[in-house]
Amino acid sequence: MAKTFSGGCLCGAIRYETDAEAKAMLKCHCRDCQRAGGSGYAPAIALPAAAVRITGTPRYYKTVGNAGKGIERGFCPTCGSQVLLKFERIPDMIAIQAASLDDPSLFEPKLDIFTSSAWAWDHMSPSTDKRPRGMFD
């Protein structure tokens, strides 16, 4: 049975909900995610984009990843909370930031990506799959 993932930004202007099964739960250690989130990694849950219901209007900031494809980080224009990720490389997927979940305990990461950019102080679980670059590299 699929879990219900719901959550949103700090001020509540952006909300999302889905009953879709997660395609991946991961921690991204790339420098862009580190800078955007102010942490050692971005915890994210990848889901089918068509199955995620979003209320409110996020603003997006686009960067270009190592594969030359765009990555858009969706954030609340009111409180600045980063909530969503869209990927040019996989347009039928969307990711939600795990810290924005109403129940963050639903996040069970199985993968660490861009581990070549991880910091020594950012200890990774020995049980997750590790990839020095992205999911597809």
Image (spheres, helix red, strand yellow):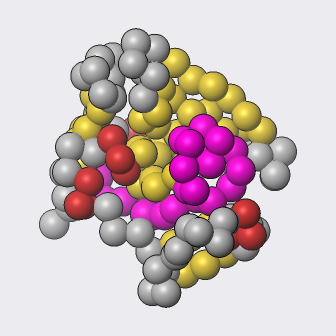
The residues colored magenta run 19-41
**Residue 65 in sight from this viewpoint:** yes
x then y, percent, for residue 84: 46, 37
Residue 118 sits in quarter: bottom right
Q: Position of residue 73 (x, y in %)?
A: 57, 33
Residue at 41% x, 69% y is 109
Eyeballing the image, is 124 above or below 57?
below
The answer to which image quadrant residue 76 occupies is top left
Q: Which residue is farthest front?
A: 121
In the picture provided, is 51 more to the left or to the right than 113? left
Q: Does residue 118 lie above or below 87 as drawn?
A: below
Q: Number of numbered discs present?
A: 0
Q: Nearer the viewer, residue 104 or 18?
A: 104
**Residue 70 placed where, x, y %?**
72, 37
Q: Is residue 92 visible?
A: no
8 is higher (above) or lower (below) than 30: above
The N terminus lies in quadrant: bottom left
| x then y, percent, for residue 39 | 54, 50
Would you identify the image quadrant in which residue 58 lies?
A: top left
The C terminus - image quarter: bottom right
- Residue ID at (39%, 18%): 79
Residue at 61% in and 33% down: 72
In the rendered image, residue 113 lying in the magenta stretch gets the answer no
- Does residue 28 belong to the magenta stretch? yes
